[in-house]
Amino acid sequence: MKTTTLAALAAAALALGGCGRTPPAPAGNASPATVQANAQFAKALPLADPAGLEDAQRGLIARPEGRITAADGRVITDFAAFGFVAGDAPPTVNPSLWRHARLNAQAGLFKVVDGVYQVRGFDIANMTLVQGRSGWIVIDPLTCQETASAALAFVRKHLGDRPVTALLYTHSHVDHFGGALGVLTPQQAREVPVIASAGFVEEATSENILVGTAMARRSFYQFGKNLDRSPTGLVDTGLGKAVGYGRIGLLAPTDLITQPTEERVLDGVRFVFHNVPGAEAPAEMTFSIPALKVYGGAENLAQTLHNLLPVRGAKVRDALRWAGYLQDALDQLGDAEVYVGQHNWPVWGHARIVDFITRQRDAYKYIHDQTVRLINAGLTPAEIAEQVRLPASLQGQFATRGYYGDVRHNVKAVYQFYLGAYDGNPAHLDPLPPVEMAKRYVALAGGADKALAAAQAAFDQGDYRWAAELLNHVVFADRGQQAARELLARTYEQLGYAAEAATWRNSYLTAAAELRNGPPTQGVDRAAALDMLAQTPIERFLEAMAAGLDGPAAEGKDLKINLVFTDTHASYVLWIENAVLHHRRAEPAPDANATLALTQGFFLRMMAGTAGAKDMLTSDELKVTGSRIDLARFFGLIDKAPGTFPIVTR
């Protein structure tokens, strides 16, 4: 099938229906244009093919029931929440995405092959377990302590109470390590191997510190955190059902894989590890278990096209390197008869695995090569995104469809990787900021009422991309324009209902909800990450403090602070110069304005926001010498962003 835009599909559907204008859809319903567009989409793919569901259900041992809750009673995972994802696709969900969501909804404990099991549906990622001589080798302990603990308890209930004899992290994203403390205690981790690839701790902690506030806020859109689980809300994330938002921790690796290929024997099982950094994650490794004929693709492979630049934001990923690693994977397979991934479901049969990896390899390579070709022809990111379509041999495979990533978004990522976000047109070199630009466009349109009328006409014709463009300007120009906000919300709903990518659907529907209800009142709870923060080098926090310095307010300020950790005996000197906050590890400076002596634990609670001004005045873990006024002035210059900033309004 040749992919077309929603506007084109809607136009075709309207032509087939013999009408030129459709009545407006009530909020929450799919418009006739969207219904017809989804129907056209369904005709182009073999959605009824049972093979995918058979693979997703293969080896089922038991399904979970009930809920996983946090210590305060908050529900983290509700196993019944996605029970509605069954049968035919409702009109409010793209039928291809609905099929994928049904396959991801197969939660439970599965036997993959003798000696290898997976727990799926407890979190967005999978926990893979390999049976050793005396216990379980756990591969990726999910996102949080609560889901990991529940998953391991479920395994022990059905397969026997065996200890964890090794813990492996495939890569540095939090959904693959955050539940470590639900699998092993710190004491147990000192007695068994905890294995990761080189650079793991640095990458795992740095991504979540420096721009973690903005990334977490945007992740609400990508993962649909605050959406209802319903046919008009969250149905999937592409990689799994939903993220487990619980207590995040980290156990430092005791054994690093530093060479391109290294072997380990863990609890009697021989593993061959392959370092694959700088593609899907900055630190990542795949593995083989030759005796079991198993190949583990970490997250370089999934049952979906992945993204080269997540909707939540991250460093742009290298498509060419990614494709190269997949060629390496073909060479490393040996006689493997089963592929296991840390998301979605396995692939059985050597020939099927080769085909699966080959098509994924070529999807990333095609996107890369065709984007570069059109870059050199002078096209801009938006123009290239409109032109690049995967060839039929790749589009027809469900595993290369964009349930998590998207070809259009990946094209723009390749452009950004090589040339940056600027497209070379000087008109875009120094554009007006969004609100000012919106006001001028609305004035040019003859005022908000005329712009709104034009947007309504576009909406009625199913031209939702153009309606969104117009309405976005109206909403930014006049935040009180309730009619524009509501129509934009309905426009985003229609775009979401037709989106094949779960990440796009979740973003559109979250935007619609925030247009009606406003942004969230609370960001991600930093206190939930205290166990992970304890493994984070102090320098990362000091870098984040520097990035939070209010530069204009700091101009002309000359302040120097000693930071002394009484339990670790490390000390740092922090100073402001030219409105820039610097730090270095050094003995306390005698000319400092103040010295703050405290335990590292108290400092971490300060960074997490669980220790406030009152604690600083009364805690036995903290002592201030020198000028308390200067110390207060110093900390007063550092912003503490709450992570609730508006995205679709201003």
Image: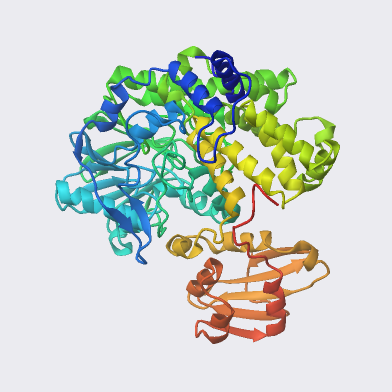
Query: Is there any visible trace of residue 400 in the rendered image?
Result: yes
Q: Position of residue 649 (x, y in %)?
A: 67, 49
Looking at the picture, does residue 394 appear above or below residue 276? above
Quadrant in the picture for residue 638: bottom right
Query: Is there any visible trace of residue 278 in the rendered image?
Result: no
Q: Position of residue 42 (x, y in %)?
A: 44, 20
Residue drawn where x is 31% and y is 30% of the image: 346
Q: Position of residue 58 (x, y in %)?
A: 23, 30
Looking at the picture, does residue 630 appear above or below residue 86? below
Q: 261 or 170, which lies in front?
A: 170
Residue drawn where x is 42% and y is 48% of the image: 243
> What coloring was used for the rendering?
rainbow
Residue drawn where x is 47% and y is 33% of the image: 92
Disc tally is 0
Quadrant in the picture for residue 236: top left
Looking at the picture, does residue 149 appear above or below residue 281? below
Q: 531 or 463, which lies in front?
A: 463
For residue 372, side relative to residue 230 (left or right): right
For residue 270, side relative to residue 535 (left or right): left
